[in-house]
């Protein structure tokens, strides 16, 4: 076989091998069949360690919400506990079969947080600078994500308008619509960890904090000092 032909084949195989960005877009298409990722892909701000960064942010949000419940800053709303089963007949047998009512997050609830990194539609507006729009995790648009991660028991009674949002609109939506639930607060904390709001004074997202910061050149103060003396 011609050595140049072999070399060309190897070169083509390298060119055709999917990049991590390609694999990320492929995962989006698998999660949301029929979605057109063309516009998103051309404006997507992609970072290599997105999975680890989001996983860290999700764990931090889980820990923070659990602490808030422990400190009674928010109330754990247990929608799925058998203690709230209205079908109970009131008998002793029915009573002893009930599970103790949960008062804080457990490993089942933690699954909601650990699943957030792959709720891709949640990040569209943030990672494209509002060229594409995001969807709330509780919206019908993300039902596939909920089913894939078996989150129906946790989110079964949460309803949300199935509409897209710009980044700041989604922040406002979470604050106004879902701030009374631990999972809504969890999403808000999760997004804040990844994309700090400009109103908070945080300078940059979590995934950029490891990068070397540019030094700010402070204006000399001697002129101000002399001016205050001689004027």
Image (spheres, rainbow, N blue to C red):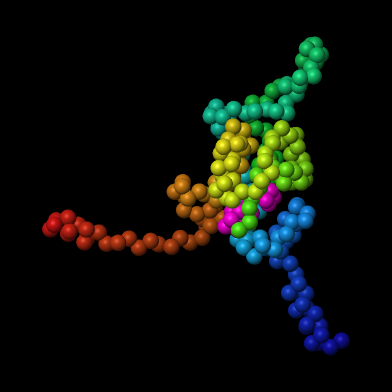
- Where residue 185 appears, x then y in whole percent? 59, 37
Viewer-side residue, 167 vs 164: 164
Residue found at x 77% / y 43%: 147
Q: Is residue 224 above or below residue 62?
A: below
Let me know if residue 19 is in the magenta part: no
Image quarter of the C terminus? bottom left
Residue found at x 55% / y 27%: 72
How many marks on residues?
Answer: 0
- Where residue 228 appears, x then y in whole percent? 17, 55
Which secondary structure class fits the magenta region best? Answer: helix
- Answer with the quarter of the image where residue 213 lies: bottom left
Residue, far top: 91
Give the extent of the magenta segment: 118-130
Q: Is residue 4 above or below residue 126?
A: below
Residue 146 appears left or right of 49: right
Q: Is residue 110 above or below residue 223?
A: above
- Where residue 194 appears, x then y in whole percent? 57, 50
Residue found at x 61% / y 42%: 187
């Amino acid at each position: 076989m011609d050595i140049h032909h072999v070399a060309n084949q190897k070169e083509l195989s390298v060119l055709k091998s999917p990049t991590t960005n390609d694999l990320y877009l492929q995962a989006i298409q698998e999660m949301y069949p029929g979605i057109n990722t063309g516009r998103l892909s051309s404006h997507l701000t992609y970072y290599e360690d997105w999975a680890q960064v989001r996983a860290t942010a999700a764990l931090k949000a889980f820990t923070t919400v659990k602490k808030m419940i422990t400190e009674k800053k928010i109330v754990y709303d247990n929608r799925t506990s058998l203690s709230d089963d209205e079908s109970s007949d009131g008998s002793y047998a029915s009573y002893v079969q009930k599970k103790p009512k949960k008062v804080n997050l457990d490993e089942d609830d933690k699954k909601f947080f650990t699943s957030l990194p792959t709720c891709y539609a949640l990040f569209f507006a943030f990672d494209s600078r509002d060229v594409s729009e995001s969807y709330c995790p509780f919206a019908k648009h993300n039902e596939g994500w909920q089913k894939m991660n078996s989150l129906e028991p946790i989110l079964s009674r949460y309803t949300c308008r199935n509409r897209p949002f710009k980044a700041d609109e989604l922040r406002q939506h979470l604050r106004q619509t879902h701030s009374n639930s631990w999972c809504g607060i969890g999403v808000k904390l999760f997004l804040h960890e990844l994309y700090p709001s400009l109103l908070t004074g945080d300078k940059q997202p979590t995934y950029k904090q490891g990068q070397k910061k540019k030094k700010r050149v402070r204006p000399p103060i001697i002129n101000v000092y002399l001016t205050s003396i001689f004027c």
